[in-house]
Image: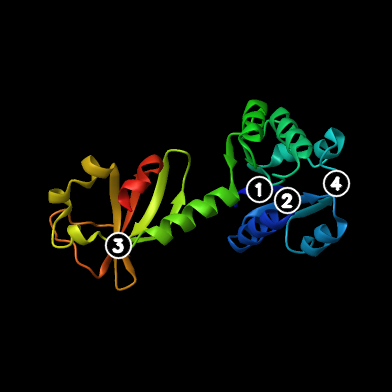
């Protein structure tokens, strides 16, 4: 059964999120106050509604209680974000995610019931900065405030050494979950095999210690 996800707010981030959810086959509900944007997605999603997302009554009419997740994507509109998070919480939505733009907005949304907050611009900036200053970062994705999945080249000083000898968990707080070679990922990682310059590592790392890997 596909996961049901509501995207409230169809700005740039909301649109990109919706496009990807559709691609992944999720059951998507969208809502926005712009009827033209809603009409654009009407045939692509399960339900599309033009609604004033600053109105508790309008939000309640969306029947969000049937959703597995509600994503509030109006980081620039504090009033609408507050109402959407609050009503979603009152309706018993299992997971509420809010896009925020400031620490104050994050605090408010969390107090009102948001299970997770995201800073799209900040996360994109952090990822870009790390890639720019690092010779070994390929990509990374933050799972939450504490954990990230990182795809990286082995550091030069790691080449020729095994994972057991490198003790990456002790030194960097990372766990290697797969090795990629010739565009193929292998989750059966041999901890005694020496690392080579033509392989990449997929690791789970402490988000606060990523800079140690640069």
- Distance Cα–Cα, label 4 vs label 2: 12 Å
Among numbered discs 3 and 1, the one appearing first in the sequence: 1
Q: Residue at x 25, y 70 (%)?
A: 198
Measured as percent of width and height from the top left, residue 147 is found at: 41, 42
Asked which secondary structure carries label 1, the reply is strand
Which residue reaches farthest top? Answer: 111
Instruction: Give the residue number, with chain letter if any, for mark 4.
Output: 51
Is label 4 or label 2 in front?
Answer: 4
Among numbered discs 2 and 3, the one appearing first in the sequence: 2
Measured as percent of width and height from the top left, residue 138 is found at: 39, 62
- Distance Cα–Cα, label 4 vs label 1: 17 Å
Q: Dot 2 surroundings within 10 Å: few (below 14), some, or many (20 or more)?
A: many
Is label 3 or label 1 in front?
Answer: 3
Instruction: Give the residue number, with chain letter if any, for mark 2.
Output: 29
- Distance Cα–Cα, label 2 vs label 3: 39 Å
Q: Which mark is residue 153?
A: 3
Is label 2 or label 3 in front?
Answer: 3
- Distance Cα–Cα, label 1 vs label 2: 6 Å
**Vertical comparison of 109 with 207: above or below:** above
Q: Residue at x 37, y 47 (%)?
A: 210
- Choose top left, top right, bottom left or bottom right for residue 82: top right
- Whether label 3 touches label 1, CB < 8 Å: no
Which residue reaches farthest bottom? Answer: 182
Instruction: Give the residue number, with chain letter if any, for mark 1.
Output: 5
- Whether label 1 touches label 2, CB < 8 Å: yes
């Amino acid at each position: 059964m596909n996961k049901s996800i509501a995207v409230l707010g169809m700005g740039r981030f909301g649109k990109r999120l919706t496009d990807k959810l559709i691609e992944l086959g999720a059951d998507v509900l969208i809502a926005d106050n712009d009827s033209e944007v809603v009409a654009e997605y009407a045939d692509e999603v399960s339900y599309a509604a033009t609604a004033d997302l600053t109105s508790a009554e309008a939000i309640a009419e969306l029947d969000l209680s049937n959703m597995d997740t509600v994503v509030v994507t109006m980081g620039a509109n504090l009033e609408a974000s507050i109402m959407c998070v609050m009503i979603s919480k009152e309706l018993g939505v299992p997971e509420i995610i809010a896009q925020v733009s400031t620490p104050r907005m994050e605090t408010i949304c969390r107090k009102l019931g948001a299970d997770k907050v995201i800073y799209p611009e900040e996360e994109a900036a952090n990822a870009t900065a790390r890639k720019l200053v690092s010779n070994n970062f390929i990509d990374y994705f933050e799972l939450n405030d504490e954990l990230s999945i990182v795809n990286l080249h082995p550091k030069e000083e790691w080449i020729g050494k095994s994972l057991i000898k490198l003790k990456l968990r002790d030194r960097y707080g990372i766990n290697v979950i797969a090795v990629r070679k010739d565009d193929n990922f292998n989750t059966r990682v041999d901890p005694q095999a020496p690392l080579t310059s033509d392989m990449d590592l997929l690791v789970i790392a402490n988000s606060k210690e990523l800079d140690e890997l640069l």
